[in-house]
Image: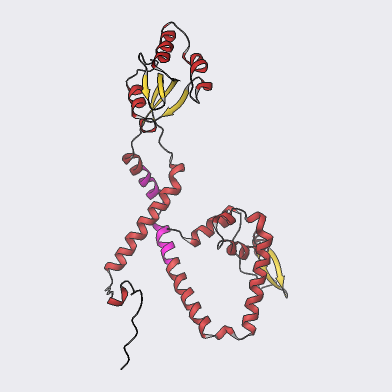
Amino acid sequence: MKLQSLAAAALALALGLAPLAARAQDTAAEPAENAAAASAEDANPVVARIDGAPIYRQEVMELAQSLPPQYQAQIPQIFPLLVQRLIDFKLATLAGKAAGLADDSEVETRVAAARERAIRDVYLERHIAGQVTEEALREHYQTYLDNNPPKQEQHARHILLATEDEAKAAIARLDGGEDFAELAKELSTGPSGAQGGDLGYFSDEQMVPEFSNAVSALAVGEYSSTPVQTQFGWHVIKLEDRRDKPQPTFEELAPQLRQDLAREVATKLFQELRDAAEIEVTPAGGAPAESAAPAAAD
């Protein structure tokens, strides 16, 4: 679930912005109050004025939240353009007021709809924020670890050759004491040959079954005594290491955990609200007809 206000707050925090502070009306404010006001103005400076009325940086940042993600990533570069667009919007608002639209019925309808959306969003955001706590996230992380035990990984090298006879000849040279990595550099036709045949760590499902089965049968430090055939050719394989794949840290999973938990909390809340209400969906609440037949003329 995407919560626009939470996303906006996170972006504002990342950019070092502070909420717009109330402007002091008392010119005789205490020095501490003056200092606090000055600090707020520094964090949220005036970026433009229209007939003397200020436009603040925070207003520009709020406008930026309506942009697609790829543009939000470029806010420092497009900030001057956003300022100009906000000036245009402010001028259009002033023109609308001058045209008497402040009390227009359509405007009032839209304001009422926006107010309803705001009430809904703030309610959901506060409810979710109260449930998606650090403790709850840690519990979800532990559940994830319990449900996703570490997978075994294997680290191997291989020498890929075109024929079985070539693979047997390579094994004979290994039996004679030659170094596996050096032999892979010399003989292997695979892309890993230049790295001594090193394939790094991998899990069984990342390799074709014939290869994975052959690796699983080896002890660490052992190489295959007979060639292994796959769709790619003939392999001589050496197992370098076997380990449990490291599980993701809490910090790595936190964004996904937060999203998943927020979705769970919202789903539960919606169900509770439904259970507490008397709901009726009328026939008109079904799928609308593709077209309405015209009434027959009398």
* Quarter in which the C terminus is drawn: bottom left
Residue 142 located within the stretch drawn in magenta: no
Query: Residue visible at 45% across and 48% down?
Result: 255
Query: Residue visible at 42% across and 69% down?
Result: 120
Applied colour scheme: secondary structure
* Image label count: 0
Q: Quadrant of residue 217?
A: top left
Q: Quadrant of residue 101?
A: bottom right
- State the image coordinates of residue 141 (x, y, percent, origin top left): 38, 44
Residue at the extreme bottom:
298
Query: Residue visible at 33% across and 44% down?
Result: 143
Q: Nearer the viewer, residue 154 or 148?
A: 154
- State the image coordinates of residue 43 (x, y, percent, origin top left): 65, 59
Q: Quadrant of residue 18?
A: bottom right
- State the image coordinates of residue 260 (x, y, percent, origin top left): 39, 52
197 left or right of 222? right
* Quarter in which the N terminus is drawn: bottom left
Q: Provide the major secondary structure of the magenta segment.
A: helix
Q: Nearer the viewer, residue 199 or 159?
A: 159
Q: Is residue 95 visible?
A: yes
> As displayed, is residue 103 above or below residue 264?
below
> What span is colored magenta in the figure?
122-141
Q: Nearer the viewer, residue 139 or 73?
A: 73
Residue at the extreme top:
176
- State the image coordinates of residue 149 (x, y, percent, origin top left): 33, 36
